[in-house]
């Protein structure tokens, strides 16, 4: 499985739509034998970013804030999206692998009490009760 994290200064970039760098981790079980740093296409539009992830075999995206339009596009492309995440990129990756990414410590500021991750009012992106990722029709890893 290939997991992409939008990164800025070693931390999850605060806004996916303008992030400049991706760390793509090749995951085997709970191990990460390989990481690649890729420049994320700039000024290329939303569809190009989704296509770039797909072309690089990314199946999971962990990022900061993301617009609804982009979030939907990524999810419809079959990419499991974990938005509104913050923290040290390596700690976030390890939290994902240990299934603790939903911990409040990794939420962006202002995303408490169910806001931001599809639990509050207008949660049109949430597709499965109890599942905060946006993979259409299923839970993470299905």
Image (spheres, helix red, strand yellow):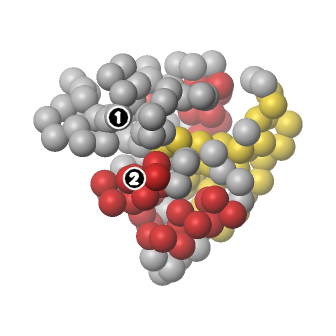
**Residue drawn at (58%, 66%) of the image:** 51
In this view, the residue farthest toward the right is: 33
Q: Which mark is residue 127?
A: 1
Which of these two is toward me, 96 or 136?
136
What is the distance, in whole Å, between disc 1 and disc 2 at their CAs? Answer: 12 Å
**Residue drawn at (85%, 37%) of the image:** 33
The tag earlier along the polypeptide, 1 or 2, is 2
Which of these two is toward me, 7 or 75?
75
Quarter of the image for residue 28 reads top right
Q: From the viewer's perspective, is 17 left or right of 57?
A: left
- Work out which quarter of the rendered image holds the C terminus and state it: top right
Q: Position of residue 55 (x, y in %)?
A: 69, 63
In this view, the residue farthest toward the front is: 137
Q: Position of residue 66 (x, y in %)?
A: 37, 53
Q: Secondary structure at mark 2?
A: helix
> Dot 1, crowdedness within 10 Å: few (<14), some or many (≥20)?
some
> Dot 2, crowdedness within 10 Å: few (<14), some or many (≥20)?
many
**Given contact means CB atoms under 8 Å apart, are the residues at marks 1 and 2 in contact?**
no
**Residue drawn at (77%, 53%) of the image:** 36
**Residue drawn at (53%, 41%) of the image:** 80
Quarter of the image for residue 107 reads top left
Q: From the viewer's perspective, is 30 left or right of 127?
A: right
Q: Position of residue 125 (x, y in %)?
A: 31, 42
User: Eyeballing the image, is 88 above or below 58?
Assistant: above
Q: Which mark is residue 3?
A: none
Q: From the viewer's perspective, is 37 left or right of 123?
A: right
User: Eyeballing the image, is 12 above or below 29?
Assistant: below
Q: Which mark is residue 71?
A: 2
């Amino acid at each position: 499985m290939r997991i992409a994290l939008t990164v800025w200064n070693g931390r999850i970039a605060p806004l996916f739509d303008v992030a400049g760098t991706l760390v793509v981790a090749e995951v085997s079980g709970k191990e990460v034998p390989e990481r690649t740093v890729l420049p994320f296409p700039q000024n290329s539009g939303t569809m190009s970013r989704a296509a770039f992830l797909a072309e690089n075999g990314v199946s999971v995206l962990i990022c900061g804030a993301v617009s609804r339009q982009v979030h939907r596009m990524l999810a419809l492309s079959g990419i499991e999206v974990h938005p509104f995440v913050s923290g040290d990129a390596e700690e976030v990756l390890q939290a994902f692998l240990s299934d603790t990414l939903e911990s409040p410590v990794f939420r962006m500021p202002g995303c408490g009490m169910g806001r931001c991750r599809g639990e509050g009012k207008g949660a049109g992106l949430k597709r499965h009760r109890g599942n905060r990722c946006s993979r259409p029709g299923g839970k993470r890893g299905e």
